[in-house]
Structures are given as structure tokens and as C-alpha cells.
Amino acid sequence: MISIVNLVGLSIGLAFGALVFLFVYEEISYDRFHNNSHRIYRVNSHLLDLSAGSESKNATNGWGIGRTLKREFPEVEDVIYMRLFPTLSIFHDEQYYNQNLLYAEENFFEFFSFPLKNGDPKSALRDPYSVVLSKKMEKKFFDGDGFGKELIFADTMIFKVTGILEEIPGKSHIDFDILISFATFKAFNPGFDQEDRWFSFNMVNYVKLQEGADFVSFKDKTTDLYMEKAADHFSSFGLRATLSYDALPSIYFEKAAGNPLGPKGNGQQIKILMLIAFFIILLACFNYINLSTARSTFRAREVGLRKVVGSSRASLVTQFLSESFLSTFISLLLAITIILLSLPWFNIITDRSFTLSQFLQPSVLAGSLIIWFVVSLLSGIYPAWIISGQSSIGILKGNYHTGKTGVRLRQGLVIFQFFISTALIISTLVVLDQLAFMSKQDLGFNNKQVVFLNASAVGFDKRQKTYAAFKNDVSSLAHVDRISYTNAIPGKYGWAGQVAFPEGKTMEESVSTEFIVADPDYVKTIGFHMLAGRDFNSEQGQEATDALIINEACVTAMGWDTPENAIGKRIDSPSGAPKGMVIGVIRDYHQHGLKSEISSVVISPQTQFANQYVIRYNAESTGDLLVQLEEVWKNHFPGYTFEYSFLDESFPRQYESEIRLAKIFATFAILGISIAVIGLFGLISFVVTFKTKEIGIRKILGATTGNVLSLISKDFLILVFAGYILALPVVVYLMNHWLQNFAYKTSISVFLLVITGLAAFGISLLTISFHAIRAASADPVKSLRYE
């Protein structure tokens, strides 16, 4: 029985530890496939607001940065420019498509290690109106035969397919469906000048340093490049601009500047998962070693007999180790079976698509074999060495003992098991508590019964011409209360980081704002609460471009004291956004969830930049409404995909990483406590068997079931309590650190900690009681005959 329990516990720990390590391995492998990844860096721009003392890090740069770095610094071997906008729709087979486009200079394939299946890497992105397709896009548009073919962009522009990508040999933070030559962007913008426009932060630059170049020295020399080239310009806005660099393999996890070109990782979660996986494997291994050393005491007489008939200590150690290696190998095979069965579930909670073949990678196989070897060695060598070192005569007389070392080892391992288990349980409850806290907070608007339609794939001119007619037709539907048009629904970014100058302040006292455009019905459609002034009025001509509505945070940032004082004040901006007169102030709301502080928001009724329709409805069932909306959509935007989302579903997606973390924590908390209980179950079985005669004697002398339960349980419950007490300060410190990621957060309650302790005690007591009651119920005569 103990052997089966032992093997199952080890198999579970190895299986799920391996699953997490595979996830972590994939995450940390981003951008490792590039040949020169060790000398490629992304260039970042930092803007320091001298009056407020705040600093922002941007993954984009002014136009002149890249060319200046290459021309003036010999450490730089090459520089590349990339850009995401403008977006263009693709018209193919009577259908419009909105794909992930990236403009890149012609040195893209020499700079990075993206492999081409077809096309010349040196010239594929050289000419205007040239595109390179991923294999997925080639199959989508041309059924796998797209090289040299043509695609129509933005209804009228013909682009030639000059290259087809191979499958990317690894994970990349640069994500795209189609590469467009940077020469095309230049053709769209005849005035584009890569020696100018230091204040236009919309270029993504990477530098490749010369082999052996001193990065630290290069970084120090270039930090103040902005101020050396355009100090007067930045100082006039009250800003100081500097440069920094992110090594290519670190960009995926970069938090401050993010990643505008593709996916973003969460470095903190990866560290947490690595720690969990390590402890889960360690927990299972210690559990196995603990039970193996305990079980070995029953083989003492066998060892004594073998020594009497001539077996050497070396042969006995070899025998124990061979058995240990064989049993752990069986656990390894069982772990593979568990992995196979668990993969679909694991893919769901991690949002990945792992396959069993990925476990056959040399690194994963090597890691598994190392773990197998170490566990086998540790679980076999200790009991073999201790037992084989005992006197054979003493063993046969029943005088075998493991000494205090063995007892203390088992006690220490039990403490460790419940230390990890209770820590995981508390962590899970804290994450769930934070998610519940965020879900219950007042967002500052009503996110129920709001659906939005994504019109970003529709061409700019068509959106402008169709806006009024589409809005009118949707408004006439029976269950539609209101419809509005914007560029940034709650949960999405507008134009963040826009520099604004409040009336009455000097140019040095600028304010960073988020600029949102929306039509006059936006405030009522979303459900904002007006604190002062009034809403937009579409019938007042000049107001369509001059009126502004701001939030409370903007009032404070502008230094206007109260919402009432802000009414009638003007805001200016070097970019023209935001610019106008404040006519209304709305109560603060969470544009970006509760992970970040509420910041300055300015709303302007300039619908030419909008691309999202927001609809508030009153229908209990949305099925009929969506059918009607799709019909109106097809009438106005034939060929464009009808894309919709509900605000109460899309807004919480900002917490996807936290939800995923909660699921993973919960899973491994269950695993941890299960492994600990399996170990406790085995050890109690061992103790009860070891004390069979003692229990029989006590029962003859009048001991009750409660006395037997107390005899067996008290020492183990003390160990469980010790593990729980040791876990408390560690997990409270770590989870308080995790909670600092949220601007609005809950606190770790004493009730939660007490409940966890009671749960650990309850589970332990149930496990102990099972064996204790069986032992107390046994016939004492048979117990005294036990050998």
C-alpha cells in the first residue's frame, strides 16, 4: 500500500512540475533564435516632466534617432526602422480583411533571423508597395502559392508579394501577418525626413552593435542624444528626453515600455511559476524519500539475514539503489501518462497549445532524467547506507534503530510539505480575493448591456461617409437605447501621453493626458456622471472641434482645484490634441481597470479619428439584437467582417494574467496539499504498523479510541502546525509584494489566514483518524501476535 501511495505521489509531482517548466521554458525562449540576439537592442525614449517630476518610458522614438545613432557612433553596425501605422484593409475574393501589418526597412531580414521560403532577403522590402506574407497568410489568400502574386490594399492600391516567410524557428516578440516595405510608408508621407522630427515619437528602432562593442560605454554616450540635438525644443515644453536600451531577449518581459509590436510576457508570474514548479517537484521528491526511508525499516531483518549469509555492504547498497531506480522509473512512466491526460486541461488554463512532442526536446528529456537520477539516488542511498551499517546480530535480535537523524529528517520533511501546501493555499485565496475585490468596485460607468462594434478595418473615407447613416439605422432598432462613436472604449487606450498646456500656466508646466475622441452621445451612452458644466451638443457648430470634457484627475493635474473652476478654461497642445475649451467635467472612472491609477482624460468630439461604435441596449436576450445589428452592418459595410464584443466581458480581460495565475495557484494548491496528504497517509501507516504491539498493549490496559488517536496524531499535528506557522510570514510578505502591482487592492485578512490553518489541520486530522481508528478497532490479541 505504501509503495503504491509513494509512486503515485511522486508521479503527480513530476508530471505537473514538468508541465509548468515547459510553460516557463517557452516563455523565456522568446527571441533566442536570432543569430545576433546578444548584440541587438531596442531603443527607448524617456520623457521627464520637469514640473511634475513624472517620467514615461516609450518603445518608440523621434524620427531622427535611428539615423543619428548609425551615423555618429562607430559602435553601431546597423539600425532598423519599423512602424505599425497606417493600417490598411485588404480586399480579396469580395471580402475585406484586417491583418496585423508591420512596416519595416529593407534590411529587416539581414538584421533579424526570420527565414524566407521565397524571395530575396536583401530586396524583398526594398521597393514601395512590396509585401512579405507569413505562411499562414499565403495559405489564406493564395492557397499556399502566393509568391509574385498581387493583393489589393485600401480598395485601390496594388501590392506585390515579394517574399514568403518560413515557419519561425522560435518565439518572437515581433508579431505580424504581413510585412510592408518601409518605402511604402515614405511614399504615403513625401515629407518624411529621418534627420528631423525629434518630437514625433512613432518610430520603433533597433540597433545592432558591432561584435565586441562596449554596450555600457555606448549607452552612456547616447543617453542625452535628444537634448544634444533638440534641447530648446524639449525645454520649451517643460520636458527632458533621454534614451535607454532593452536587450532583444528581455523585450518580451519589458513592463515599463511594453511591446507595441506583439505579445507581452509577465516576468513576475514566470518567477512565481518557476518557484511553484520547483517546490512541487521538491515536495513530491521529499515525500518519496520520506516514505522510502520509513518503509526501509521493515526490511531490517532481511538485511540482517543477508549479512549473516555473506552479503557485503556494497552489494546491499547496490540492491537498494537498483530497487529505487526501478521504482522511480515506473513513476516517471506514470508521470508521462498523467501529462498526456492533463495536456488539454493545461492548455486551457495557460492559453497555449502544447503537444507531447514538446516534451521530447533534448533539454526537457535531459531535465527529466536528471530529476529521476537524483531522486532515485537520494531515496535509495540513505536507507541502504544506514541499514547496511547496522550489526547483523543486533538486527536479528530486533535491536535495529535509525537513530534521531532519521526521525528528524522525516519530521523536517513533513514540516516542509505543509509549509509549501499552506503557502500555496493562502496565495490562491489572496489572488481570488483581489479578483473579487476588483470585480465589485464601482468603475465609474455602467458596463452592463453595452455592445461595441469594431470598424477599424473599414477604410477611413468609408467610415466618415457612412457614420451618420449607420448610426441612424442602428438607433431605429427596437432594443437600442443609444449609439455613439469613439476611438477608445473603457478598457482600451486612446492617444496616451499627449502633452497639454492648461490655461494660466507656462509652457514648462505641461500635463500628460490621454486623448479620446467621441461623438456627442458618448457620455450618455457609456453612463458617465457629470459633475460640472454640461455634455456635448452636436447642434452647436464650432463646439464639434473646440469643446472638451475632462475627468476629475485632469482637473487636479491642470491645477484648477475644483470641477466648477475648470469650466471655461482652455487647453492647448503642440500636436493639437487636446485643444479647446472645457465645457464639462465627469466623475473619475476606470478607463484601464484597477491595476493602474486613474489618470488625466480629455474627450473631444472629433469623430474623424473614431473607429468603434458603442451601443447601449435594453434587450434581455441579445440573439435577435445581434442579428439585426449584423444586417445593418452588411448593408453599410458589405464585405467587412462583423466584429462585436460586450463591454462587461471585454473590460475584465485586462485581468487575464491574474485570472490565469489564480487558476494555476488553485491547481497547484490542490496538488500540494494532495501530495502532502499522500505523504502523511503513508507515514501514519508506517507509524501505526510500527506501533502495532504498543497499541495492542494499551488497549488491553483500557485505552480508548480517543487515546489511540491522541497517541498517533499529536506529534504529526505539531509538525503540521509548525509548517503552517513558518509559511505565514513568508507568504504574507510575498503576496503583499504581489498586491503592490495594483493601484486599487484588497488586504490580506486574518480570517483568510485562520481558515487556511483550520483547513490544513482538518485535512491532516482526517488523514490521521483513518489509520488511528482502524488501529484502535483492531483485535488487541492479533496486535500482540504481530511480527
Image (spheres, rainbow, N blue to C red):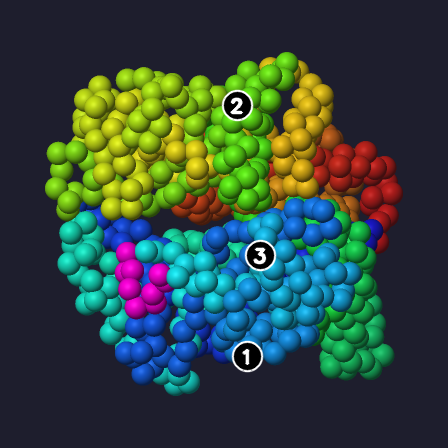
Residue at disc 1, secondary structure: loop
Amino acid type at image mark 1 = Lys
Q: Is residue 534 magenta?
A: no
Decide which of tag 3 and tag 1 comes sooner along the chain: 1
Q: Are marks 3 and 1 in contact (CB under 8 Å)?
A: no
Query: Which quadrant of the figure has residue 119?
Result: bottom right
Decide which of tag 1 and tag 2 comes sooner along the chain: 1
Residue at the spot 52% in from the left edge and 34% down from the top edge: 465
User: Is the residue 611 above or below the residue 381 in the image?
Assistant: above
Classify 10 Å Cα crowding around label 1: few (below 14), some (14-19), many (20 and above): few
Decide which of tag 2 and tag 3 comes sooner along the chain: 3
Q: Position of residue 697 (x, y in %)?
A: 76, 41
User: Is the residue 394 above or below the residue 259 in the image?
Assistant: below
State which region is magenta. 191-199
Query: Which quadrant of the figure has residue 305?
Result: bottom right
Q: Which residue is mark 3?
A: 157
- In the picture, which quadrant includes the C terminus? bottom right
**Along the line of sight, the residue nearer the viewer: 338 or 165:** 165
Residue at disc 2, secondary structure: strand
Q: Position of residue 28 (x, y in %)?
A: 55, 64
Q: Position of residue 634 (x, y in %)?
A: 68, 33
Q: Which residue is mark 1?
A: 122
Task: Nearest to the eye among marks 3 and 1: give it.
Answer: 3
Residue at disc 3, secondary structure: strand
Q: Position of residue 463 (x, y in %)?
A: 53, 37
Q: Is residue 193 magenta?
A: yes
**Along the line of sight, the residue nearer the viewer: 168 or 197:** 197
**Along the line of sight, the residue nearer the viewer: 412 or 579:** 579
Distance from label 2 to label 3 (Cα)? 33 Å
